[in-house]
């Protein structure tokens, strides 16, 4: 009955809070016996009742056969002491997030459980190696990181510390599957996979708003309509809460030794420090009224002007010409000195484009052609743009049935800039072996509901185009934040998919 590699029949769950309950529930539903322990008197028994009630409600909704619920309930037992956990093949710790307390617990578990039993922690921010540091048999210690609420979130990160054995990882992957989860194997590094990978989406959005390019409502609308994200970055931050996501951003930035690519913005800190946490405090980037519904200002441009239909193209661009003709524009290659001039830059802002090509920046406007353009368009302008021309363009876009966001100058607009940062971080995670390319995509889709993984997103835009966007951003801003990952650069240079291993 050795834990490593052999079947795991009995799981000790230590800590019967939100996470421990969920872990116990999926364990008994997966056919394993559970010994549930909590340091607080009566907490484990109360949790056991809550788990049973949860199973009953699944039966009532017709989602679980009554016989399966009864069998699962029979596998759940409350342990009154740590010593009572001795028969366990695997212990999963889900107690308070405090290193010293976890280290002490692991020391005790090592003394109580068999030497070949597996020990796992559900920590979300501590290093597995630190928790295991004073243990003797560190090869059997790993992370088993679940997401809240456990029964609904399919992903589990199996985290490998430097001393963890392959057999331990293999056994935990199997246990994760038996619990009905989808396991991904992750290195013991700051933020593990999902919490690290999620930084780019929100932090680049904060950057764009901090630069005055667009409002939170516009950024959210663009990311939903252009790339199909279920939630925009600002509604997402309001949901998790600035009291949670700001410290996570700080820990990960520090953990990667202040890599500029992972830096968040002063705006994020201001929100956290002012107590504008989001949904839970009634005010974040948006206000939340009775019933928790967000009051989100409109992201859609309006125009009182007469539509302008005559435009010049800044350069030959079949995709842009086709889009504009489809929207009822008369497109010419000749600049008549009066009409708006349109371009579709990759990573370049309108100011740089106008200066490089010698165009009149007051009449030059950009459209973002990355992602979907059939719902919403993003129209970008340089400082000093002629407002009447912009409003005339907007009027025609609206007449043709498109929603439009009008934004100020930004290398990479909104959609391509955030997407390039998400893609680059996914590539960097593959490069530094946080997880395999396939697991990175799987983790981000299941853990954060992304419509596609960051490496698939890289392929969708094209590795060469992502590299171009980032290189432009890096050169225009002079900021190392936009430094392309070597993983991306090599795949772009060689014409390979971002999912290519090695
Ligand atoms: P919680 O506060 O709901 O539950 C913690 C439980 O542990 C409490 O019942 C407490 O009495 C018990 N406890 C504290 N010290 C103990 C000890 N020395 N021995 C035995 N029991 C002890 O916390 P929650 O949210 O369930 O989190 C638990 C762990 O899971 C933390 O490490 C947290 O970082 C991690 N985690 C939390 C997630 C979340 O969204 N809440 C997501 C992923 C991981």
Image (cartoon, rainbow, N blue to C red):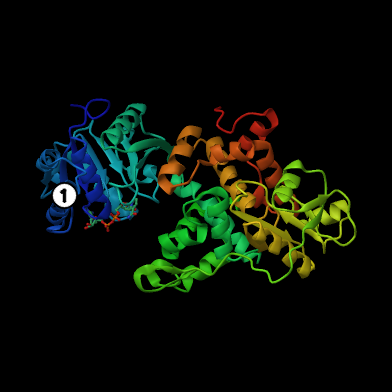
In front: 359, or 501? 359
Q: Which residue is found at the position 79% from the left and 52% from the top?
A: 330
- Horizontally, is 421 left or right of 238 in the view? right
Quarter of the picture holding the N terminus = top left
In the rendered image, residue 283, in percent from the top left (x then y), is placed at 44, 72
Quarter of the picture holding the C terminus = top right
Q: Which residue is found at the position 37% from the left and 68% from the top?
A: 292
- Horizontally, is 246 left or right of 280 in the view? right
In front: 310, or 103? 310
Q: Which residue is found at the position 68% from the left and 37% from the top?
A: 464
Assess mark 1: CB under 8 A from ligand 1? no
Total residue callouts: 1
Q: Quadrant of residue 87?
A: top left
In front: 114, or 480? 480
- Horizontally, is 271 left or right of 47 in the view? right
Q: Is residue 262 visible?
A: no
Identify the residue position indicated by label 1 in the image.
Answer: 60
In the rendered image, residue 336, in percent from the top left (x then y), is placed at 90, 57
Q: Quadrant of residue 182?
A: top left
In the rendered image, residue 140, in percent from the top left (x then y), is placed at 30, 33
Against 383, residue 48 (above or below) is above
Q: Is residue 365 visible?
A: yes
Q: Which residue is found at the position 43% from the left and 48% from the top?
A: 448
Q: Quadrant of ligand 1?
A: bottom left
In the rendered image, residue 120, in percent from the top left (x then y), is placed at 29, 41
SS of the residue under disc 1: helix
Q: Residues within 10 Å of mark 1 (few under 14, many from 20)?
A: few
């Amino acid at each position: 009955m050795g834990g490593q590699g052999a079947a795991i029949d009995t799981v000790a769950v230590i800590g019967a809070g939100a996470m421990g309950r969920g872990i116990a529930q999926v364990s008994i539903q997966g056919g394993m016996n559970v010994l549930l322990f909590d340091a607080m008197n009566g907490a484990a028994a109360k949790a056991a009742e809550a788990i049973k009630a949860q199973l009953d409600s699944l039966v009532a909704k017709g989602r679980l056969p009554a016989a399966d619920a009864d069998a699962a309930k029979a596998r759940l037992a409350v342990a009154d002491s740590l010593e009572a956990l001795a028969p366990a093949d695997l212990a999963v710790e889900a107690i308070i997030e405090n290193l010293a307390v976890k280290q002490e617990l692991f020391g005790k578990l090592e003394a109580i459980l068999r030497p070949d039993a597996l020990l796992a922690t559900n920590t979300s921010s501590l290093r597995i190696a630190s928790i295991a540091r004073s243990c003797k048999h560190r090869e059997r210690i790993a992370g088993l990181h679940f997401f809240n609420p456990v029964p609904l979130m399919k992903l589990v990160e199996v985290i490998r510390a430097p001393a963890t054995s392959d057999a331990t990882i293999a056994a935990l992957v199997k246990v994760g599957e038996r619990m009905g989860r989808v396991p991904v194997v992750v290195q013991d590094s700051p933020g593990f996979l999902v919490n690290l990978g999620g930084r780019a989406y929100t932090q680049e959005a904060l950057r764009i708003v901090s630069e005055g390019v667009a409002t939170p409502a516009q950024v959210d609308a663009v990311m939903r309509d252009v790339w199909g994200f279920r939630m925009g970055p600002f509604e997402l931050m309001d949901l998790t809460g600035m009291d949670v996501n700001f410290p996570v951003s700080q820990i990960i930035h520090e953990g990667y030794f202040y890599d500029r690519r992972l830096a968040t913005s002063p705006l994020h800190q201001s929100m956290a420090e002012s107590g504008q946490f989001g949904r839970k405090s009634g005010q974040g980037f948006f206000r939340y009224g009775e019933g928790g519904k967000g009051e989100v200002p409109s992201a859609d441009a309006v125009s009182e002007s007469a539509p302008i239909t005559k435009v010049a193209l800044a350069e030959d661009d079949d995709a842009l010409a086709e889009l504009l003709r489809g929207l009822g524009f008369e497109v010419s290659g000749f600049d008549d000195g009066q009409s708006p001039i349109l371009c579709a830059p990759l990573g370049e802002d309108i100011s740089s484009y106008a200066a490089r090509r010698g165009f009149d920046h007051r009449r030059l406007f950009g459209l973002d052609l990355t992602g979907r353009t059939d719902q919403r368009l993003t129209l970008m302008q340089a400082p000093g743009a002629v407002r009447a021309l912009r409003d005339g363009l907007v009027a025609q876009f609206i007449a043709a049935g498109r929603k439009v966001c009008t934004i100020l100058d930004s290398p990479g607009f909104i959609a391509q800039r955030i997407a390039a940062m998400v893609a680059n971080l996914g590539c960097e995670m593959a490069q530094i072996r946080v997880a395999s390319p396939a697991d990175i995509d799987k983790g981000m889709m299941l853990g954060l509901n992304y419509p596609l993984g960051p490496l698939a997103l890289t392929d969708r835009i094209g590795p060469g185009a992502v590299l171009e966007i980032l290189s432009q951003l890096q050169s225009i801003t002079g900021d190392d934040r936009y430094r392309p990952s070597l993983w991306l650069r090599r795949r772009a240079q060689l014409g390979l998919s971002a999912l290519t291993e090695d």
